[in-house]
Amino acid sequence: VPDMPAVPLTLEGAAVLHQMFRFDRGGWKRLPKEERGRIAAEATNALAPLEKGFSGIHHNQSAIYSQFGHKGDLILIHFRDSFDDLHRAELSIAGLALASFLQPVHSYLSVVELGLYESSAKTYGQLTERNLTPHTPEWNAAVEETLERQRAAMLPRLWPAIPDYRYICFYPMDRKRAESNNWYSLSMPDRQRMMHEHGQIGRRYADTVRQIITASIGLDDWEWGVDLFADDPLVFKKLIYEMRFDEVSAVYALFGSFHFGLRVPARSLGGLLEGELPAL
Amino acid sequence: VPDMPAVPLTLEGAAVLHQMFRFDRGGWKRLPKEERGRIAAEATNALAPLEKGFSGIHHNQSAIYSQFGHKGDLILIHFRDSFDDLHRAELSIAGLALASFLQPVHSYLSVVELGLYESSAKTYGQLTERNLTPHTPEWNAAVEETLERQRAAMLPRLWPAIPDYRYICFYPMDRKRAESNNWYSLSMPDRQRMMHEHGQIGRRYADTVRQIITASIGLDDWEWGVDLFADDPLVFKKLIYEMRFDEVSAVYALFGSFHFGLRVPARSLGGLLEGELPAL
Amino acid sequence: VPDMPAVPLTLEGAAVLHQMFRFDRGGWKRLPKEERGRIAAEATNALAPLEKGFSGIHHNQSAIYSQFGHKGDLILIHFRDSFDDLHRAELSIAGLALASFLQPVHSYLSVVELGLYESSAKTYGQLTERNLTPHTPEWNAAVEETLERQRAAMLPRLWPAIPDYRYICFYPMDRKRAESNNWYSLSMPDRQRMMHEHGQIGRRYADTVRQIITASIGLDDWEWGVDLFADDPLVFKKLIYEMRFDEVSAVYALFGSFHFGLRVPARSLGGLLEGELPAL
Amino acid sequence: VPDMPAVPLTLEGAAVLHQMFRFDRGGWKRLPKEERGRIAAEATNALAPLEKGFSGIHHNQSAIYSQFGHKGDLILIHFRDSFDDLHRAELSIAGLALASFLQPVHSYLSVVELGLYESSAKTYGQLTERNLTPHTPEWNAAVEETLERQRAAMLPRLWPAIPDYRYICFYPMDRKRAESNNWYSLSMPDRQRMMHEHGQIGRRYADTVRQIITASIGLDDWEWGVDLFADDPLVFKKLIYEMRFDEVSAVYALFGSFHFGLRVPARSLGGLLEGELPAL
Amino acid sequence: VPDMPAVPLTLEGAAVLHQMFRFDRGGWKRLPKEERGRIAAEATNALAPLEKGFSGIHHNQSAIYSQFGHKGDLILIHFRDSFDDLHRAELSIAGLALASFLQPVHSYLSVVELGLYESSAKTYGQLTERNLTPHTPEWNAAVEETLERQRAAMLPRLWPAIPDYRYICFYPMDRKRAESNNWYSLSMPDRQRMMHEHGQIGRRYADTVRQIITASIGLDDWEWGVDLFADDPLVFKKLIYEMRFDEVSAVYALFGSFHFGLRVPARSLGGLLEGELPAL
């Protein structure tokens, strides 16, 4: 009997870039007020259309956040149809006059991913019962059929709109490959069970927090990025604290830096640069 | 019998931001004395009202510290009613003329937290005896009742005044999730016992040191921040050294960088910038 | 019976340098348009001949990529006949007028390597059966004969052309030497079996992704560098994710930073510096 | 029987600050020679009185070292009666005209500490035999009596003069809290035995090297700082290498960065800034 | 029977400083050609005599290397009779006009060391048979006699000439003190055996690579520095890769950053600064 694949099926959607910038407020203040106005207006005009999304099919969208603390001043998030489009967005931002006052201090490149643990277990099981061998044309066709069906069903989650909440929390994470606790050496059923328990916690918070998971293996330094969106930032803390006790996080999660920001509608960008908190 | 929740009940209070700045003393000295005076006065006028607190109900307060060593020159601490207010404070500081001489080199974002280990164990036990299932409406209502009662009783500790001591010690910390020693895999009773022993050490120092614990899961890079306030900085060392031998610290604590500063009344800020140690 | 050598036979080819630069776009924009054109043209003229390769025998070649995110803006990759030639390339780039706008933020020095695990096992086995002792002249001559034969057979992979794909993913890696999981303490047959399984995954992706492995022990901070080239960047993610579950990666791989870029034909460099995405 | 305290008794003396500066030699050379002379003279005049100590009772003293390598150019060490005085010293240095040419790149804040392992074991044992309970008033009074007696006996070591040797070696260190080797989980007798063996090595080097231990728990990022002073820098290497094999170092010590410098009498500071090695 | 010392006997020779500089090529290009020539000539005149060595007895010598990659542009290596002389060399370099274009980005301070494992085992064994106790005057005198004899025999290796090869590879290293694999807890015979096997690999490469080991315990952040010199840089890779499989490296070695450079005769320095690769 050939081994079932260890890797779960996944679906991929929007290409995503997080950009964290430090704002040169000193240089900004030294500009005449009119020039500040002109530069801010150019940025607003460029970013306002993007916050609605600019494609009829997918949610190609960008959003601005004002970051707390010294890690950066502005967070820009871009969701796009392709990596080509994503890089075009990056070059556009770099072309704004405002960019001379923005120092890139951090970024994160990833792609929206849905991990299909339940579906993988079911599909792999059925195919094995049919005596199919992994990676044969028959196996691949059957897997592709499953993926196609799931992709159609989950389209809105693969190309998500940026949730319209006031606060964002972003952090990257890995699954641990330590000496005795190694996620990648666990069996599919063990991983599936833990991911299932993990998901149940999240479901209890569905009313107050939206989560978008992006994958970054081969794209950036961690394996996944997590974006949480909420109006009450305390739910970030409560959700993540509760999750930290479940097995998959307690034993197998490694976390990177946390980035926390407040949504800035494009029309409020000029005000923010002058020191005004965007209105609710 | 359903499992009791692993996560202890917590209460949250003030949103808190620590800011560490390097002061560009070279640039400062090159300013004419009058301009230095004007800039310092603007900062003093902005910060003086905040050191008393500016809300009738909560201790919305900011405080200044002169930091020792190369990690920074000024520490500003802000306690606020909400994260919106906290970010407004951050933007106000950035709007001061003094800000052109302040480079943000570190910061910490967190929220005042009281961890209710004893109360959680009691409440979870009672609810389980009443055959309630976690996360059902009945369970949640009973838990919320407990939280409401505790919140009322602990109001001053949730919205604390910044203690009026000469020295501050701030550091962030995590609970370890190592291969064999993993805090988040321990049972609630084990964690409760260790937290209790830990608290008993702190109580012996209550006369000379004040402690404020803030949580930062989902907000910043460590799980908690600890602020200690005292007139004699040696008690920081004695307290933390003694605690390092108790089980919860010896085995399960990971510490970040330590920040040490001396309180600067807003009215003494101008003097400090000219090199004068604030009077006792 | 003398021990067989633990180190597998390897073949070495082109000397390779990866250079990551941050582009000073602010300074660039401040130049008159004509001067920008002149500087870009000089760089294009220098780099265009190198992207075809400039030696009749080997693929001495350089290529440009536009990097995503804050880690850098331009990646230059140089394959050369020798380390002397490689350093000459580095000095040439530094001599361009464009170099005043390029800050070197990262680099990687390595040499194309083919690890001959299967061939080593076979050769060492045969020589041991002939009762030869490792490192004797007879042993060395027989080993050199094997290497010579393999070198001739694998010439194109030792001096590879830079694959003509739109995207690149580069990362360095180590084999772990942890307390209980130590790659360098494993037997040759164990290592050979794991490398074989690893290679089988790669073979399934051969249609969509090209891989070049370079060794950097004694040259740079990690043991190997991996370059992946593809038109669809999602295959980077799929390939590396699938590999992460095989034993040699799950247990024995340590990864450095990931660098991701989009190919820039030399003739498109000027356009890129003005903010235009290179055409497909 | 109540448990004996795990924490050993300690005595604290002088508050200590190490400052490491990079010297802007380029900017310095651009000054007219006369101005360089004036600025150097101001610094010499400020620092010369401090190198003798300026208190009749304690050795309130500062010293200058020229640091080797890229980590910094100047090391300043300050021993003071209090943290208030120490910060006053820091502000004074920042007020010198020379400070515009000094970039603070590292520092260390700590307090002279004598760890009384032998005395703690004896005292705790006696008090337990007298059936006293730790932390009761009787216990505390008896402990305070011991501390008072030791403090009087060890006064010169608590407020030490900076040893008059040509070379200094400074490094911070921790005691390990690893998964199986945790210093803070060891019994007092085990720790006492290891500290005793450790001390015996040091005693053999007493003729050629002076050591000052400072504690930094709650003050800076490591638990202790170690200053070694000698005329022959090879004894630093020999002493530390030999100690690395004793149990407390081999198993339980974690070391930070090493800083190495050559003593600069205040009167030789001007010469050093011009590139002259201070005479023996 | 008293324990034999755990620390092996060592001999120390030349004090050594590695300096890595980034070269401000942009600033350099902005200088008039004549001034560049004058500045380069001053540096060449200062460094040319040092590359021959300038003492009749020892090889007091300095050498220049052009570094590959972004870690630095120039490596300077100084071997001197004493740390006083070494710091004088450092101050001399800082005094050159060229120094305004050199930013120190890395350095390493160490001392040539020969570790006498075989001799230590033999000597300690003989002295123990003579019933001598370690650290008694008799023991010390006998040890000093051994050291004196070895020192005379190994003089050229203690004060080595800088090998006249085209390429250099420098890296620092530690012996591991991990939880179960701790070099410093091993017995002398175990360490001696592993060092012996390690040395045998090196001996097979003696024709093509020269190695100089320097110790840096108490001087810099790692325990040892390793310099390899060769005309063919591939032997660096082959030697270190082969050694990585021997027990002392596989299990007990920790490596720092690798620095790789190409020898620059002092007379070729001016050319290098203009972008010319030094001739073979």
Image: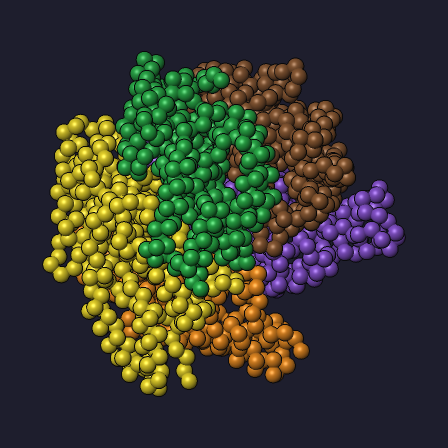
Chain colours: A brown, B purple, C green, D orange, E yellow
Q: Which of the 4 image quadrants contains residue C63?
A: top left
Classify residue E144 as left or right of residue A249: left
What residue appears at the point 15 percent right and 53 percent down from the top-left corner?
E53
Q: Residue at x 57, y 67 (%)?
A: D185
Which residue shows up at 31% across the image and 27% down it?
Answer: C55
From the top left corner, tell me how far across and down residue D194 is, in percent. 47, 73
C63 up-or-down from C129: above or below = above
Q: Where is C105 relative to A83, above or below?
A: below
Q: Quadrant of the N terminus of chain D?
A: bottom right
Q: Give the x, y percent position of residue C61.
A: 36, 28
Which residue lies at the image location 28% right of the left edge and 56% below the top edge?
Answer: E206
Please identify the quarter of the rendering in which residue B269 is found.
top left
Left or right relative to B166: residue C110:
left
Viewer-side residue, D132 vs D211: D211
Q: Position of residue D130 (x, y in %)?
A: 61, 83
The vertical placement of A167 against D215, above or below, is above
Residue furthest to the bottom: E131
- Pick the quarter of the image with the C terminus of chain D: bottom left
Residue B136 in sight: yes
